Amino acid sequence: MKKHTQWIFAALTLALAAAPFTAILLKEPGAVYANQNNHTSVMTEGTVPEEEALPVFGTTPLKVGSSGQDVYELQGRLKHLGYYAGAIDSQFGAKTRNAVTWFQWKFGMKADGIVGAKTKLKLYNATKAWRPTEPSTSTANKTQGNGNTGASNGGNTNTAELSSGNTMGLSENDLRIMANAVYGESRGEPFEGQVAVAAVILNRVKSPNFPNTPSGVIFQPGAFTAVADGQIYLEPNEQARKAVQQALNGWDPSGGCIYYFNPKTATSKWIWSRPQVKTIGEHIFCM
């Protein structure tokens, strides 16, 4: 009996001596796992949303009455797309709000005129080629053109070629967005049809019934399919640039038309009521 008691006492002693080590072994994996969870939580709730939603702007939503560097950038990016035509003055006023609302509507967002995280992200993705410009609108386009030099191969050369026939005094941004529009609207069409698309844009600029700049014409709500589906932001090829150049030089295969449509895909009944002038490729050009 005495020996049996000694064995029990020895077992209890060993168990008590091993308890701290057992606790460490059981606790350590839990501690590592908990730290990993905490690290993941920080990345999920802090770093990732900030990176996705706020790549360039600050964290404060922008609205009427806002001012400062973020509004300067907002106006510059909206101007780059043709939505904003006012001075880049870093002041969020009615013109800026209207431009924001227009942009939000065109991109399928809630058009409330308030620039939150989603609007900032969408605007950033649509204007990755934009570079900061000077506050003066007279120099903004020039600076913007210089900023794009490193963004695409031969950017200055292409713009210089387009500018050579620019008798209308169009900005470099207008010339670039015209090439984008021609490519987005009519790539795959015969060259004559691409020139005709460029000519339609210029004809609208000259018409008192449309905005007086190519950017204004192209981004007018509902005007061009390529803007609605995002193809306006595809990099144009050399043929699209040459088509713009030919239109700038005075070639108008459309015969002065201000509308065109694809009869296979057109959903507007109104467009069929316009006087039709000619068909080039898949497009019908009309007045």
Image (cartoon, rainbow, N blue to C red):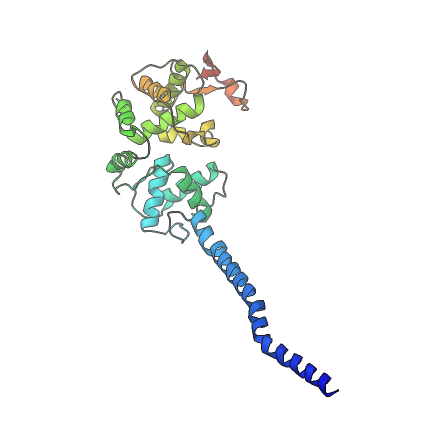
The residue that appears at 41% across and 32% down in the rendered structure is 233
Residue 254: in sight, yes or no?
Answer: no
Where is residue 188 drawn, in percent x and y?
45, 18
Where is residue 71 drawn, in percent x and y?
34, 47
Residue 231 as seen in the image, left or right of residue 138: right
Give the number of marks: 0
Who is closer to the viewer here, 251 or 52? 52
Who is closer to the viewer here, 241 or 263? 241
The residue that appears at 37% across and 35% down in the rendered structure is 81
The residue that appears at 33% across and 38% down in the rendered structure is 130
Residue 286 as seen in the image, left or right of residue 28: left
Residue 189: in sight, yes or no?
Answer: yes
Who is closer to the viewer here, 16 or 135? 16
Where is residue 182 drawn, in percent x and y?
40, 23
Residue 263 as seen in the image, left or right of residue 94: right
Q: Quadrant of the C terminus?
A: top left
The residue that appears at 66% across and 79% down in the rendered structure is 11
Up-down relation of residue 18 to residue 91 (above or below): below
Most distant residue in the front direction: 3
Most distant residue in the top direction: 278
Up-down relation of residue 144 to residue 268 (above or below): below
Q: Quadrant of the N terminus?
A: bottom right
Res 120 quadrant in image: top left
Up-down relation of residue 152 to residue 193 (above or below): below
